[in-house]
């Protein structure tokens, strides 16, 4: 295997300090949006690096994977010891997600950019639709008497001051979604939480906060299954990755700080519009 | 706000420390490395620090799984043990693939473009990663 991709040696930019500053700022914005909206920032960072800065898609994905891991580590450290993370369910789904990421990471080098653009257009369009469909979403079952079963869980919810118990339904569907999310993570360098969280919530009956916390742990492990492949291939520009990671870490702090206060409705609408635009740009590239 | 949750188990506290420690250590390496890299791009110190920072970052999530395995064995939940081990197996496959690829890339006859075709000092850095 070589670094020659799709018949062309991939372009490595000589990186100016200004570019790194822009990448860091973009990471900051992506990180705070991610924290505010409860999704990974990769879905914003990858198209920004690729379309605006002209970074090759594989390098943008490699850089984004690093930010996904950083976000996941910080978020899951915060969640450690709380009952929000359903590790038993998470690890079962993780088998599918990691396998998908490995498949994606291995095969991405032999998939033409044209196909990746179309996949990216589909994923951003789906993300926009999911975001719009969940503008008012916030469902948690308040019944502590339910038997959670082997893959369910219980946690204490601040808002209601009660213990929330849930069962996990349709585990095969969740496995399928995790496999898909993992593949997308391996192919495009985005976290995949945007697919996983709504699926766990809407299809499998996992309360939103538990789904988000479990997914936050999972995306890092998923990214770790393909990031080394990108790294060894030379698709992780170290200075750019460092700038993006630092930006995302700072940005997510800001996002979480605002998160409790902000009403995310308007932001979701705006971001759905941005994602729809990104989707169209990628489609037009191939039209 | 007070939580009526039981005290955080020792294992989870350790995990929390490991995850935060990993993230902090890599952020520190990346910050200093980035600074050094900006001062003299491609020079040893910055390059190595950036590499250490990124590798630390990639290894950090593995501690999550390691702790999960220990926890699964402790509570004798064999399905949980099996899934965590399966996840580790997948990550092992990633590592094997990565190392195999890296070895292939280092071979002189592979179709690597010459280092000069890659602009700037980053090019040489990127080449070294694979070797």
Image (cartoon, coloured by chain):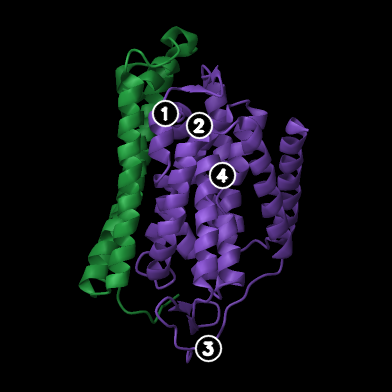
Chain colours: A purple, B green
In 3D space, how far apart are the residues under numbered discs 2 and 4 (Cα atoms)?
19 Å
Question: Which class describes the residues within 10 Å of circle 1: few (<14), some (14-19), or many (20+)?
Answer: many
Frontmost residue, A159 versus A104: A104
Q: Marks 1 and 2: in contact by CB < 8 Å? A: yes
Residue named by callout 2: A109
**Where residue B75 appears, x then y in whole percent?**
24, 75
Q: Which residue is mark 3?
A: A143
Quadrant of the snapshot with the C terminus of chain A: top right
For the residues labelled 4 and 3, the Cα–Cα distance comes to 35 Å
Helix, strand or loop status at disc 1:
helix
Chain under numbered label 2: A
Asked if the residues shown at circle 2 and circle 3 are in contact, with their CB atoms under 8 angstroms apart, the answer is: no
Left or right placement of residue A234 versus residue A42 in this view:
left
Residue A209 shows up from this direction:
yes
Q: Nearer the viewer's eye, disc 1 or disc 4?
A: 1
What's the residue at 50%, 31% (across, down)?
A109
Q: In front: mark 2 or mark 1?
A: 2
């Amino acid at each position: 295997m070589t670094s020659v991709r799709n018949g062309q040696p991939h372009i490595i930019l000589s990186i100016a300090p200004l570019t790194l500053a822009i990448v860091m700022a973009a990471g900051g914005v992506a990180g705070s949006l991610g924290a505010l909206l409860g999704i990974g920032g990769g879905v914003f960072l990858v198209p920004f690096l690729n379309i605006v800065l002209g970074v090759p898609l594989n390098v943008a994905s490699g850089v984004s994977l690093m930010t996904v891991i950083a976000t996941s580590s910080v978020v899951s450290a915060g969640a450690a010891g709380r009952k929000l993370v359903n590790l038993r369910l998470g690890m079962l789904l993780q088998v599918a997600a990691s396998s998908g990421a490995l498949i994606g990471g291995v095969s991405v080098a032999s998939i033409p950019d044209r196909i990746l653009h179309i996949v990216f257009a589909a994923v951003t369009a789906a993300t926009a639709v999911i975001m719009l469909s969940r503008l008012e979403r916030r469902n948690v079952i308040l019944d502590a008497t339910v038997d959670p079963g082997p893959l369910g869980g219980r946690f204490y919810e601040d808002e209601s001051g009660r213990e929330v118990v849930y069962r996990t339904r349709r585990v095969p569907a969740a496995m399928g979604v995790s496999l898909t999310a993992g593949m997308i993570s391996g192919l495009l360098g985005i976290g995949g939480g945007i697919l996983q969280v709504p699926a766990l919530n809407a299809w499998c009956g996992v309360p939103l906060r538990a789904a988000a916390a479990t997914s936050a742990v999972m995306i890092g492990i998923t990214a770790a299954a393909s990031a080394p492949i990108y790294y060894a291939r030379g698709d992780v520009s170290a200075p750019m990755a460092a700038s993006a990671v630092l930006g995302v870490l700072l940005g997510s702090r800001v996002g979480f700080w605002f998160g409790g206060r902000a009403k995310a409705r308007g932001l979701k609408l705006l971001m759905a519009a941005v994602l729809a635009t990104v989707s169209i740009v990628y489609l037009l590239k191939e039209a | 706000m007070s939580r009526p949750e039981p005290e955080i188990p020792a294992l989870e506290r350790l995990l929390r420390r490991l995850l935060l420690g990993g993230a902090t250590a890599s952020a520190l390496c990346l910050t200093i490395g980035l600074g050094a890299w900006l001062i003299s791009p491609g020079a040893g110190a910055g390059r190595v620090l950036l590499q250490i920072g990124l590798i630390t970052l990639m290894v950090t999530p593995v501690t999550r799984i390691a702790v999960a395995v220990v926890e699964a064995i402790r509570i004798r939940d064999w399905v949980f043990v099996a899934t965590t081990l399966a996840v580790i197996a997948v990550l092992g496959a990633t590592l094997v693939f990565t190392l195999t690829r890296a070895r292939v890339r280092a071979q002189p006859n592979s179709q690597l473009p010459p280092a000069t075709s890659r602009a700037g000092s980053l090019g040489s850095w990127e080449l070294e990663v694979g070797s």
